[in-house]
């Protein structure tokens, strides 16, 4: 009887993880569609005050089904021409972007006629279907494109691959900040924290309110977000999770509470700021070209900040008493408590650290998207769970490696699949790796029985 009890206990984290992912998928699939339909187009674009539009024709006839992509300042969107050859692409702010026509969707043997481009528009060097576009005095720009016979010139596959590798590394690093905090929470409490997406949103919201609404300097917004993130982590543990743990609630019940709390916080955010997207100061800067790689100074700062913070977390976990106690609790909470470690006190520190990491990730995510929105953290939640499971449940370093793999997989996948499906590629990678190594990359096999 004793052996059976141990086996069930050790299986429980895997059951919780599987249930967590299934419920996360259900939450996404069952989310109310009314808000999204009011703010998005039929092809999934978020409606804003700024857009590029036009008509594509060939021999004075409209060309339907042509895929158009717009990219820049961390934003990417796409659409198709309708039966009348018309297209429209919404963007978050009035900046300079790169407009690309997918030549594989054009009639055979034709290209965008460079002689009939709008005044002041030229193809980007080395291409025949990518153009730098920017607005005039208004928030709309009409770009009628005419096709003609010609030879296509495109960016090489190697250059595209290298550019997306760097973009995936940038995304993976900011994802790692949030994932490491969520992994520490799971490791010490066995809680699949569905509110972690809202903790990410909270960081972006505090930075936005401080800088955009109150017009304070950016450093003040960053400081407010970091302090506010730590306070939110402390408040959630002190007000909700510690009392529930002391009442003896199981991990499944705690997980269900976290799902409800996630939904409540999400719609509280929407109530106060609405459904619009807000930009942080300095968003959408002009990119700098390093060969095939296009990075803005904000991208480089974000990657540097992520690396510094990750190294600081690694030092904390491996060199400080609290960090070593955190790892001991993750390995065996009962033995850690018997050794004299104040488990509740360490868990409190873990929640504060997780809140700070989530807030920093929220600020970087707001610049990467770009923009702050009431549900921005929800977009990262499933990817965080994928990274944590991929790296090995409960280990922060595993979450780091998993996040880098997920980030790179998401960006590279756009070479072969539509950008709307790029986040699904992370789940494919997760499934493939777990088939080979079920415990995750850095997870440990458990002996049962």
Image (cartoon, grey):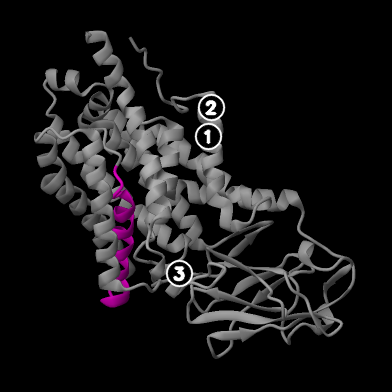
Marked residue nearer the N-terminal end (1 or 3): 3
Residue 435's mark?
2
- CA gap, disc 1 and disc 3: 35 Å
Do labels 3 and 2 touch, CB within 8 Å?
Answer: no
Is any atom of residue 285 visible in this view? yes
The quadrant where residue 227 appears:
bottom left
Helix, strand or loop for the magenta stretch, by majority: helix
Do labels 2 and 1 touch, CB within 8 Å?
Answer: yes
Q: Secondary structure at mark 1?
A: helix
Relative to 409, does residue 199 appear above or below in the rendering?
below
Q: Secondary structure at mark 3?
A: loop
In the image, which residues are magenta?
Answer: 193-216
How many other residues sit within 10 Å of disc 1, few (<14), some (14-19) or many (≥20)? some
Determine whether, in the image, residue 436 is placed left or right of residue 79.
Answer: left
Determine whether, in the image, residue 341 is placed left or right of residue 436.
Answer: left
Relative to 293, does residue 121 appear above or below in the rendering?
below
């Amino acid at each position: 009887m004793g052996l059976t009890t141990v086996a069930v206990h050790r299986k429980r984290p895997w059951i919780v993880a599987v249930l967590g992912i299934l419920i996360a998928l259900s939450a996404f699939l069952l989310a109310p569609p009314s808000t999204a339909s009011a703010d998005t187009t039929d092809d999934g674009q978020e409606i804003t005050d700024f857009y590029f539009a036009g008509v594509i024709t060939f021999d004075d006839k409209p060309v339907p089904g042509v895929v158009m992509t717009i990219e820049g300042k961390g934003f990417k969107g796409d659409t198709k021409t309708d039966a009348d050859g018309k297209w429209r692409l919404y963007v978050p702010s009035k900046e300079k972007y790169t407009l690309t026509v997918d030549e594989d969707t054009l009639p055979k043997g034709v290209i965008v006629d460079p002689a009939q481009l709008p005044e002041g528009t030229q193809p980007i060097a080395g291409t025949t279907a990518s153009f730098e576009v920017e607005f005039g005095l208004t928030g709309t720009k009409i770009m009628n494109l005419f096709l003609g016979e010609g030879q296509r010139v495109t960016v090489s596959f190697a250059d595209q691959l290298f550019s997306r590798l760097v973009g995936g590394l940038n995304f993976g690093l900011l994802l790692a900040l949030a994932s490491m905090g969520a992994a520490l929470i799971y490791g010490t409490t066995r809680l699949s924290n569905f509110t972690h997406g809202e903790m990410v949103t909270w960081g972006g919201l505090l930075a936005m309110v401080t800088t955009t609404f109150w017009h304070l300097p950016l450093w003040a917004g960053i400081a407010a977000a970091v302090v506010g993130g730590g306070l939110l982590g402390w408040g959630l543990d002190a007000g909700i999770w510690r009392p529930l743990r002391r009442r003896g609630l199981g991990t499944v019940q705690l997980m269900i509470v976290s799902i409800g709390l996630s939904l409540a916080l999400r719609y509280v955010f929407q109530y106060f700021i609405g459904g619009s997207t807000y930009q942080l100061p300095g968003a959408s800067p002009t990119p700098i070209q390093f060969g095939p790689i296009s990075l803005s100074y904000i991208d480089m700062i974000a990657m540097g900040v992520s690396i510094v913070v990750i190294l600081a977390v690694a030092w904390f976990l491996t060199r400080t008493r609290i960090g070593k106690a955190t790892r001991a609790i993750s390995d065996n909470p009962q033995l850690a408590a018997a050794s004299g470690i104040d488990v509740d006190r360490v868990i409190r520190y873990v929640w504060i650290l997780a809140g700070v990491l989530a807030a920093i990730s929220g600020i970087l995510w707001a610049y990467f998207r770009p923009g702050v929105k009431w549900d921005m953290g929800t977009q990262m939640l499933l990817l965080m769970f994928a990274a944590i499971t991929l790296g090995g449940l409960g280990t922060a370093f595993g979450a780091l490696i998993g996040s880098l793999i997920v980030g790179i997989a998401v960006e590279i996948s756009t070479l072969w699949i539509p950008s709307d499906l790029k986040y699904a590629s992370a789940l494919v990678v997760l499934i493939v790796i777990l088939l080979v190594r079920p415990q995750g990359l850095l997870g440990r096999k458990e002996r049962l029985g």
